[in-house]
Image: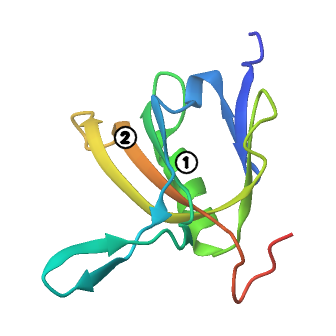
Amino acid sequence: MAKSRLWGLLGDIEFTLALAPESFSHDRQVTLPEHEVIEDRPSVQWTGWKLETLSLTFNWHVGWCDPDEQLLKLWAAQDKHEPMRLVLGSGTWKRKWLIESISDSLTHTDPFGDTLAIEATVNLKEAGRTVGTQAR
């Protein structure tokens, strides 16, 4: 059996093409506080950047992986509370990210209740300057 091509890494978690996310979205925002003005519309001031976020949605099926094992890897990484480098196969996105949230749904089981498919969404927040951990 041919080895599956590497799609990317999140920390030490490998995602092959078969395990790659179905969707990958990026959010980049700035901070724009409003300043109230008497008898006029408020003014807006640009004060800086917010931390960027990424959202990755996975659909894992027992036909090509162990869905429970994949989910457990993400939970273990989140439990460490440590920034992780996200590197895509092309070498891009070399910043560090924290797992902010994981939402998962058991979408299919066999007649005995064993997992056949899981859909999971992982939300990452740019590590920026982390407090309480070392971001290298």
- 35 left or right of 6 in image: left
On residue 5, the disc is none
Q: Quadrant of residue 76?
A: bottom right
Residue of label 1: 69
Amino acid carrying mark 1 in the image: Glu
Above or below 96: residue 27: above
Q: Residue at x 40, y 46 (%)?
A: 120
- 48 left or right of 101 in image: right
Residue of label 2: 118
Amino acid carrying mark 2 in the image: Ile
Q: Residue furthest left?
A: 39
| Spot occupied by residue 113 in the image (x, y as percentages of width and height) | 26, 44
Residues 82 and 109: in front is: 82
| Spot occupied by residue 58 in the image (x, y as percentages of width and height) | 45, 37
> Looking at the image, do the residues carrying marks 1 and 2 touch, with CB atoms under 8 Å apart?
no
Q: Residue at x 57, y 65 (%)?
A: 51
